[in-house]
Amino acid sequence: MGANSSTINELSENDYLKKLSGTEAISENEPFWNQLLSFTFSTPTNSTDSKLLEEATISICKSLIENNPRTGNLGALIRVFLSRTKELKISAECQNQLFIWQAHNALFIICCLLKVFISQVSEAELLLHFSYQKTDPGSYESEVEDLLEELLFCLIHLIVEVPLLDITYSILLEAVTALVVFLSYQLFRKEIINESVIHKYLMRGRCLPYTSRLVKTLLYNFIRQEKSPPPGSHIFQQQADGGGLLYGLASGVASGLWTVLTLGGVGSKPTPVQEQSSPLANQSLLLLLVLANLTDAPDCPNPFRQAIMSFRNTQDSSVPLSPSPHSFQINFNSLYTALCEQQRSDQATLLLYTLLHQNTNVRTYVLARTDIESLVLPILEILYHVEERNSHHVYMSLIILLILTEDDGFNRSIHEVILKNITWYSERVLTEISLGSLLILVVIRTIQYNMTRTRDKYLHTNCLAALANMSAQFRSLHQYAAQRIISLFSLLSKKHNKVLEQATQSLRGPLGSDDSPFPDYAQDLNVIEEVIRMMLEIINSCLSNSLHHNPNLVYALLYKRELFEQFRSHPSFQDIMQNIDMVIGFFSSRLEQAGSDLSVERVLEVIKQGAVALPKDRLRKFPELKFKYVEEEQPEEFFVPYAWSLVYNSGVGLYWNPQDIQLFTMDSG
């Protein structure tokens, strides 16, 4: 690439890059390509480095956009890359680094160029740039347009065929990144892309048979979480005998333009976070999420989504073969472990949601695990730190809980898992608590946070739906969980009284006032009464189905019995209050008979005895509370921008100018 450029700022003046982007057509057979591609570097792994790189090379890229119709140099570079990839698999097996080295460098340059091309020209214009040849200005051959499909196929073939080794790590990462870049037209469109030539090539033709292998490979990249090799392990090193041809090629440009791009950035050391992360796993997951959310073609459902929906466990022979042509098998135990360990990232949570919602094999497996706390605890920790998370991450976590609580087996088992010393729960020391009680505490805390901060009805609905699904199987509720249930009802009751008073005062205000707030109060009152009704139904469901298992809830109910008096005669709550009123009256009578000045232990003993004596037929039966998660009618309107916001914020070594982004606002991620 030239030994004269030693800083990023000098890239725009580099002779090799200027020749590539200039007015002279370069034949694929010229020695120039060996010179251009003989450089050593570590690929940028953060947006800061990528921003510096893009700013330094933007003039080169724009020159190529201007001159390529006459030179066809972009197509020549791509053909050179394709020729270098033919022996990649054998080269990896034989530890022959020359092909890998030059192919990687070619792909890195292609990727840098493509990112600018895609941000500057339409897809139709990009297709023309792929077709331009070294001919008369502006002319091209239509049949050569398939060079785009050839490149996409080559990238997929590379990802699924080349083994993951230290010497292949960088080129595999670059291939995954290149596919993300190819799909990034979506970032520059406000509407969801429904028709795209790039999408067509990926979902049909030569690429289609590799769908399941690509999805499987990307999943295994996520599962393995392979760290980037130590600097120098994947580039040429001087041999003990003093070196040879390969070392000479590499060392000849050791001070060249790309050597400044170290893993941690220019003039900096890699941070501990960067050293511990897996760029390939992260990028693979982002690509998988983007592919899964491509829009179905009118006559062709998204094959990547089909593959995600239908893959099976390698260890389960009882599952019938899927009719999907893109089904495959993967180790569910390894996948489950990776999902549990990576839940702190948005993209891992979105993957978990996608699998639980769309793949029945994964959902069945997860619900059958005996260590379900390994998955649930990281999700609860996300919700506990709600103020530190973006709203999408919180929503995904809540929806995952809602999906899990649709299963009665899950609702029973979480009360059998006993946890000790939950260090991240700071409101109260929890030395021993069931997973079920902890889940209730965290969900109630999320509701209370939402009531005072975001006031999002959708979040309220999901929280209450999860509690309602669990309520019939509440078992041995921790005393603090029981208290928090009644405390939430107390908070709702106070809010109801406040809004009711405000609504009443507004009615007494001057008639004919143009800015009367009454309609707003009416709406607020309606929402609060819906939530109160839901809370009463949750309490009633527990009392009707498992009263004898929850003396702490009965104790909390009796301790705050005055809260419920105002709702006895309320027309919206009369029916549901019958059971609660009867339970309060029954146990109050038992406690009066037991005497005065009773200790907490004695009160609980009376409650346990009374629970056995209470005739079951005295409690009115209501329909079972069951809420099922239903995806939006147009889920792509949420999931496509969400997936791309994750790419924008978390993509390894990717940078886009925020002023160019059209798909989502910059505060939505």
Image (cartoon, rainbow, N blue to C red):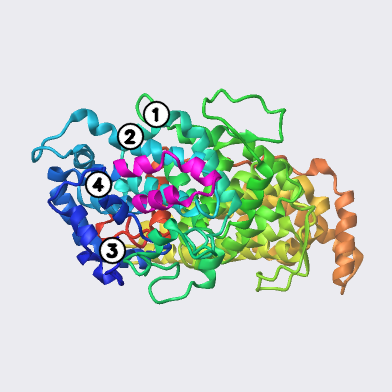
Do residues under tags 1 and 3 come within 8 Å of each other at their CB atoms?
A: no
Do residues under tags 1 and 2 come within 8 Å of each other at their CB atoms?
A: yes
Which residue is at a point 53% across and 37% down the rendered structure image?
A: 308
Ranked by sequence position, the earlier of labels 1 and 3 is 3
**What is the C-alpha distance between the residues marked 1 and 2?**
8 Å
Circle number at residue 519: none
Residue 253: x and y, percent?
A: 35, 64
| Amino acid on which the number 1 mark rests in the picture | Arg
**Closer to the camera, 618 or 363?**
363
Write down the residue under mark 3: 2
Residue 91 magenta: yes
Residue 153: x and y, percent?
A: 39, 36
Write down the residue under mark 4: 30
Q: Residues within 10 Å of mark 4 (few under 14, many from 20)?
A: few
| Amino acid on which the number 3 mark rests in the picture | Gly
Element at badge 4?
A: loop
Q: Residues in magenta? A: 79-107
> Is residue 649 rendered to the left or right of residue 537?
left
Do residues under tags 4 and 3 come within 8 Å of each other at their CB atoms?
A: no
**What is the C-alpha distance between the residues marked 2 and 4?**
25 Å
Write down the residue under mark 2: 149
Residue 598: x and y, percent?
A: 88, 71
Circle number at residue 206: 1
Ranked by sequence position, the earlier of labels 4 and 3 is 3
| Amino acid on which the number 2 mark rests in the picture | Glu
Which residue is at a point 18% across and 38% down the rendered structure image?
A: 133
Residue 380 magenta: no
